[in-house]
Image: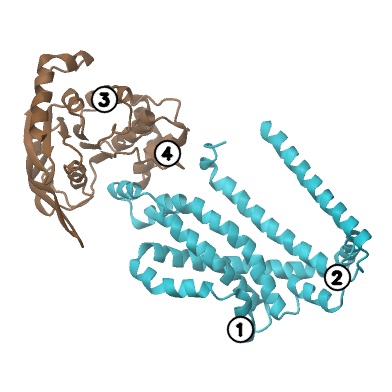
Chain colours: A brown, B cyan
Amino acid sequence: MNSANNHPLLEVKDLGVTFTDDKGSLQALNQISFSVDREQFICVVGPSGSGKSTLIRVLAGLLAPTSGEVVLDGIPINEPRQGVGIVFQKANLMPWRSVLRNITLPLEINHVPQNEANERASELIELVGLTGFEDWLPHDLSGGMLQRVAIARSLIQDPDLLLLDEPFGALDALTREKMGAELLRIWRVRKKTVIMITHDISEAVFLADRVLAISPQPGNLRLDLEINLERPRQEDDRFSPEFVVYTQQLRDAIR
Amino acid sequence: MKDFGVGIRKIGFLVLSILAGLFLWQMFTTFSQIPSFIFPKPIEVWDRLIIVLQDGSLMKHALITLQEVLFGLMLGLSAAIITGYFLAKSRIVERVLSPYIVASQSIPIVAIAPLLVIWLGPGIFSKILTSALIVFFPVLVNTVVGLKSVPRELYDLMRSLQANTWQRIIKLEIPAAMPVFLGGLRIGATLSVIGAVVGEFVGADKGLGFLVNVGRGLYDTALVFVAVFTIVLLSLGLYGSVIFIENRLLSWQKRNGD
């Protein structure tokens, strides 16, 4: 379509973030550089305190970098912008809004007429498997369902880039695996560029085209690993020898 | 269906407890032989009520007090909400204002009321102000606490969706702070009546507080009882209205628990 398609969608150049307060300063990210092509699924792994969440906040435009820059589609990110969907660690829904009204919130803020908003939401509600729950309140939903609502909300403006900050961290292991598979299915249908933060190495290998490993304090990019497992991925892939080698490499990198 | 049954039972208990109270009151006045200008029997209070209802004086005074209370509430609420918003949002405002606000709370309202009557005259305005003053503090505190309880993550969400200030206030801060705010309003609503009556006590020629004063002066104790019960009724009515609003606005909270 345009020349931008030849460039990577996202470029992170020498990104550094340092937090300073009365007690001193903490370097959260140090000289991080990588680029992401369109429709790639990237996972970022690292132990807690490795600045993973800081990275996603910078990519979301919620936090300004101390040094370096992040360029999305040719434009440096300094503040939140259109074309980026975010799923937070907690589902982060408004408890007084129904499932449907939570999903249409981004459209409401952009003054999209309600009919159109409802139409677009109902498609997504079907995609994430929440049909019949439109009028439910967040209290009455399970953790997995809450994150489905959050995913639908992040997709409603049809973003180019989807950022997920440990979206399944609070879920139990089985639900987490199921949601991972769901996410892959949604990604296949919607063809987004995805960057997902996780502390679970095998989840990262299972989901991603590429896994970035970040070590803690200061957050350095230790390994940028291409995952060459066939898609669509199967649950059995988790037990294949390649899978084990990938997880081993990542584990060594962040130790 | 189940709620309906529970409602009937609640009303039943209420009636029963009122009847029991009246019975004890009747017993006490009958057997203690206290003269009725000191402690009237229920029936004497009832007769007095009928008289002031028929000559329209109770209605007249009650409406005056109601007016003072409603204006006082409105004034106190607006001042508390606006001040509360800036207190919650700005460190500097908080540091500058909070000593005054806390200090003002250590002055009893009965001490300020005479000043207000001197400054504003014995008319309705001094009562509106005493009422507003007493409403101000609890509503202010709950506004601040409510606003500070809005989750940081939801602010991030609104920012990432590029919501403007107005949208942030309407779609996030007001609904999120509402439960705590309404808790303050509950207290404020009952206090507003006390504020107005205290104002009337200090200097007025109308209102329920004035009626209490008149009854006391004439040793018309039954009239004092009538006025006091009307004040209680007014308070309960306001309190009930807040509960009604709460049930309407906070229905999203109702599901968990019971």
Label 2, residues with CA under 10 Å away: few <14, some 14-19, many ≥20: many
Instruction: Inspect the image, locate mark 3, and give the three-letter code of the amino acid beneath it.
Output: Gly
Q: Is residue A231 left or right of residue B152?
A: left
Q: CA distance from mark 1 to mark 2?
A: 29 Å
Above or below residue B98? Residue A236 is above
> CA–CA distance between discs 1 and 4?
52 Å
Q: Amino acid at mark 4?
A: Arg
Q: Which mark is residue A101?
A: 4
Q: Earlier in the sequence, mark 3 or mark 4?
A: 4
Nearest to the eye among marks 1 and 2: give it.
Answer: 2
Q: Which disc is residue A159 wearing?
A: none
Q: Are marks 3 and 4 on the same chain?
A: yes
Q: Disc 2 designates what residue? A: B221
Q: Is residue B224 toward the left or the right of residue A3 in the image?
A: right
Chain under label 1? B
Query: What percent of the width, then of the height, locates residue B225?
Result: 82, 66
